[in-house]
């Protein structure tokens, strides 16, 4: 359930890139489920290429650079360099296009069961020497299959410029279909039961959130992938994420087949659809610091709870009870949701943020019975944040709607083990 990445938390290298280094060109040779080749080219020789999004050391462990090169991992992230330390202007790496859960980030690849592949461009971003604010990246992808970038499908050599958190790009033969909720590239291998539930429930959640938070000024592109191949024993789950104009849902693991057959998959999917739809209507207001992910991840959880408490109260109550248990364990270990996330427990941003924002919703409704609680707060957040999410802007919105006392309580709840007090 990572949202968004769906999750959207980018680790950006500080400083300005040397003017002589120039932009890095990323040349991709996809090959279905076989290893992909990525070649980095620079205008001038460099001593290293640094990756602005390095949530862990999995590149150093899994990427295979050409002879004489290595990917190294350090306190500031990962970098690609020559083993002998000499300058270079080209470097090639090979990687397996497999789904991988990354902390506080989007999966690099989401394989489709029908043979297609979705990948996150931000995973391939690299900067010459160091990264600058507003860094851009030039991509060149060559494929015999259609490549879908920003709603446009092309074959052969496809070129685009990327930036910020990157985007999802699809390589495969499935054509986008127009649906009630926007354009969609839905895996041909997706079981009928999941497809029917998706087509029934996602538009309903989007309609509800549009009524509370305003309609979107675009039709989102939805990617839904279903992968049960190359499974590790017991590996099973789902992940979602949102990027500007895009939402993706990835289901993985052979366990889905058993759960679908036994009829106990629908509740988890329903919550997942409600959570991911909520992210679309949060208007990309993601505080950049990982420790403040409790705002948007907890917010999506709380909005899902609000969307379901009248139509599926048993599911809503069960999810709330589970969050209390899991958040209690996180706080006992770390002391606060912010400290828990900093220590590597990113799940705390979901469950503890959920509890904080459910309480904010309840207190706003109690003080202002005619309001719609958290949705009123989020509308104020959108109006006041100027398109840049932050804890300060969110607390200012809470203060605007609920007063200084509620804003102080909310800030304190994120910094202590007293959630719900």
Image (spheres, rainbow, N blue to C red):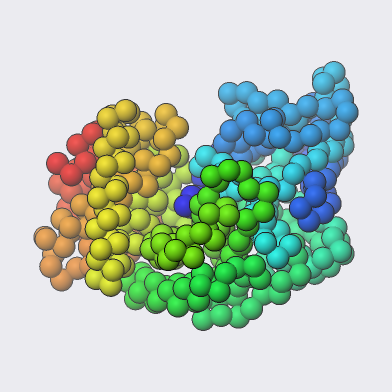
Q: Is residue 223 left or right of residue 410?
A: right
Q: Is residue 285 left or right of residue 175?
A: left
Residue placed most toward the observer, 202 or 167? 202
For this orientation, the residue located farthest to the top is: 84
How many circles with numbers are drawn on the protein? Answer: 0
Position in image of residue 391 (x %, y %): 35, 45
Residue at 56%, 80% (x, y): give it. Answer: 179
Position in image of residue 389 (x %, y %): 42, 51
In the rendered view, tell whether residue 238 sits above or below residue 194.
Answer: above
Residue placed most toward the observer, 138 or 357? 357
Residue at 54%, 44% (x, y): give it. Answer: 234
Residue at 15%, 71% (x, y): give it. Answer: 370
**Taking the image as drawn, is residue 4 in sight?**
no
In the rendered view, tell whether residue 67 sits above or below residue 238.
Answer: above
Can you tell which quarter of the image residue 375 is in? Answer: bottom left
Q: Is residue 33 left or right of residue 291?
A: right
Position in image of residue 302 (x %, y %): 31, 57
Residue at 15%, 46% (x, y): give it. Answer: 405
**Taking the image as drawn, is residue 248 in sight?**
yes
Quadrant that contains the C terminus: top left
Residue placed most toward the observer, 248 or 313? 313
Position in image of residue 240 (x %, y %): 51, 56
Can you tell which quarter of the image residue 329 is in? Answer: top left
In the rendered view, tell whether residue 320 sits above or below residue 114.
Answer: above
């Amino acid at each position: 359930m990572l949202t968004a990445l769906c999750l959207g938390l980018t680790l950006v290298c500080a400083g300005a890139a040397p003017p002589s280094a120039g932009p890095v060109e990323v040349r991709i040779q996809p090959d279905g489920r076989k290893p992909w080749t990525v070649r980095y080219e620079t205008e001038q020789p460099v001593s290293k290429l640094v990756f602005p999004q390095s949530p862990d050391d999995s590149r150093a462990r899994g990427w295979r650079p050409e002879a004489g090169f290595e990917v190294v991992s350090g306190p500031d992230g990962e970098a690609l360099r020559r083993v002998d330390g000499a300058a270079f202007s080209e470097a090639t790496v090979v990687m397996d296009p497999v789904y991988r859960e990354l902390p506080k980030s989007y999966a690099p690849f989401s394989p489709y069961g029908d043979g297609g592949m979705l990948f996150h461009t931000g995973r391939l971003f690299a900067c010459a020497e160091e990264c600058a604010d507003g860094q851009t990246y030039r991509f060149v992808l060559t494929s015999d299959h259609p490549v879908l970038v920003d709603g446009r499908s092309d074959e052969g050599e496809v070129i685009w410029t990327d930036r910020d958190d990157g985007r999802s790009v699809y390589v495969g033969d499935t054509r986008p279909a127009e649906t009630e909720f926007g354009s969609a590239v839905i895996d041909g291998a997706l079981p009928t039961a999941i497809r029917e539930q998706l087509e029934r429930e996602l538009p309903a959640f989007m309609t509800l959130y549009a009524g509370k938070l305003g309609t979107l000024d675009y039709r989102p592109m939805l990617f839904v992938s279903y992968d049960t191949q190359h499974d590790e024993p017991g590996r099973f789950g789902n992940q979602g994420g949102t990027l500007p104009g895009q939402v993706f849902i990835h289901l993985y693991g052979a366990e889905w087949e058993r759960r679908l057959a036994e009829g106990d998959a629908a509740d988890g999917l329903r919550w997942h659809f409600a959570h991911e739809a909520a992210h679309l209507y949060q208007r990309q207001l993601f505080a950049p610091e990982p420790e403040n992910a409790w705002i948007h991840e907890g917010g999506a959880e709380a909005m899902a709870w609000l969307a379901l408490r009248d139509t599926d109260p048993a599911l809503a109550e069960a999810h709330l009870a589970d969050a209390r248990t899991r958040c209690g364990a996180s706080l006992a270990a770390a002391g606060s949701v912010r400290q828990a996330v900093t220590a590597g427990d990113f799940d705390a941003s979901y469950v503890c943020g959920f509890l904080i924002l459910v309480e904010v919703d309840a207190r706003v409704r109690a003080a202002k019975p005619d309001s719609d609680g958290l949705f009123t707060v989020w509308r104020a957040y959108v109006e006041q944040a100027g398109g840049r999410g932050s804890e300060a802007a969110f607390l200012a919105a809470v203060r605007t709607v609920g007063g200084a006392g509620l804003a102080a309580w909310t800030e304190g709840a994120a910094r202590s083990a007293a959630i719900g007090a």
